[in-house]
Image (cartoon, rainbow, N blue to C red):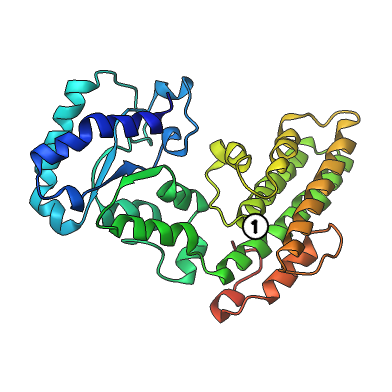
């Protein structure tokens, strides 16, 4: 059973009654779900995932005022619930944390956005890593009668300003063109295989970022990038060729094959950009698309930044 499903079952079978019994009158003020750091929150967990930073349970989110009134009692009740029903423990990595437990809503989001909720201005949207947004909106909310937690969640999920999206896409178009469509071949010609692999890696990262941005979905960090890409409505078929660029060698005919794959991926991205009405289609070299997208930015603060800043 996947961790997200197990979490929901644990809440439905035991957590709901615990909240009802221990904190009557607060049931409608406690948001419950599983969101945050960990493969189970993305739905990507498997047996290997259980070796560290993995635990069955759920999150409960409170307003700061409610946390001051019932936070300690709710935490104690939840800890007892875990001891009664869950005995398995797992290793924790230095940077990893188990996602479940009691949180103040504002503090939970501050871990990911640096503020008490969704980003408050264009620069916060621009400079916060997409992987943090992805972790802030993954998983599932089982109950949220009050609605505050879900309101912030929706703003992060769907609220990126269009000028910020254009700025990010412009930068990644230029980076993808420079690293994959230009420098990879030159590095191979110079016999610099290490540099060629770095160029490929840069291209894959930029192309992947473009694909997620074109889908208006926050890209998770590299570990889950390809798996998440396969679930996207548009350009999900690019996950396999992008991964091939990284796992195949640079010997013999494979370099020619990689060059063709790079151009095919660039063509697919260019067509999608055009199909969304962001620019006209103008071949598969991505750099010109970057400058065209850059010109569409209306916000002066963003437009004054270097095109490569993303």
In which quadrant of the rendered image does the C terminus lie?
A: bottom right
44 with respect to 150 (left or right): right
At a point 39% along the width and 25% down the height, the residue shown is 52
* For residue 202, side relative to residue 254 (left or right): left
Q: Quadrant of residue 153?
A: bottom left
Residue 115 in the image: x percent, y percent?
A: 34, 61
Q: Quadrant of the image for the N terminus?
A: top left
The x, y position of residue 71, in whole percent, is 13, 46
Q: Nearer the viewer, residue 106 or 280?
A: 280
The total of numbered circles placed on residues is: 1
Q: Can residue 261 be seen by looking at this rendering?
A: yes
- Which residue occupies 29% across, 18% down? 88
**Who's the residue at 60% across and 41% down the image?**
231
Residue 194 shows in the view: no
In terms of depth relative to the viewer, which is nearer, 263 or 270? 270
Above or below: residue 49 compared with residue 12: above
Residue at numbered disc 1: 214
Picture residue at 47% right of the left edge, 38% below the top: 42
Mark 1, Cα crowd under 10 Å, few <14 / some 14-19 / many 20+, is: many
Lateral position of residue 207 relative to residue 192, left or right: left
Percent position of residue 284, x then y: 84, 57
Q: Nearer the viewer, residue 287 or 22?
A: 22
In the rendered image of this protein, does residue 52 appear above or below residue 211? Answer: above
């Amino acid at each position: 059973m996947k961790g997200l499903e197990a979490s929901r079952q644990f809440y439905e079978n035991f957590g709901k009654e615990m909240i009802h019994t221990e904190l009557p009158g607060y049931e409608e003020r406690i948001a419950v779900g599983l969101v945050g750091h960990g493969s189970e929150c993305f739905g990507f967990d498997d047996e290997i995932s259980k070796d560290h930073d993995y635990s069955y349970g759920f999150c409960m989110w409170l307003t700061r005022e409610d946390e001051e009134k019932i936070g300690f009692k709710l935490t104690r009740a939840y800890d007892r619930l875990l001891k009664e029903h869950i005995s398995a423990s797992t290793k924790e990595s230095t940077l990893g944390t188990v996602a479940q437990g009691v949180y103040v809503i504002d503090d939970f989001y501050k871990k990911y956005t640096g503020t008490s909720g969704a980003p408050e201005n264009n620069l916060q949207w621009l400079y916060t890593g997409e992987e943090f947004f992805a972790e802030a909106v993954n998983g599932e909310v089982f109950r949220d009668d009050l609605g505050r937690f879900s309101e912030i969640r929706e703003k992060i999920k769907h609220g990126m300003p269009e000028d910020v999206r254009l700025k990010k896409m412009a930068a990644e178009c230029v980076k993808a063109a420079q690293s994959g469509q230009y420098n990879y071949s030159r590095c191979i010609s110079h016999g610099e295989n290490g540099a060629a692999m770095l160029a490929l890696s840069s291209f894959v990262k930029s192309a992947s970022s473009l694909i997620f941005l074109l889908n208006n979905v926050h890209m998770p960090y590299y570990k889950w990038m390809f798996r998440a890409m396969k679930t996207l409505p548009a350009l999900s078929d690019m996950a396999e060729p992008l991964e091939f660029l990284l796992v195949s060698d640079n010997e013999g005919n494979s370099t020619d094959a990689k060059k063709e794959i790079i151009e095919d991926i660039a063509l697919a991205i260019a067509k999608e950009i055009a199909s969304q009405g962001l620019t006209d289609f103008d071949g598969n070299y991505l750099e010109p698309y970057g400058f065209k997208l850059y010109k569409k930015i209306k916000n002066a603060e963003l437009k004054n930044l270097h095109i490569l800043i993303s």
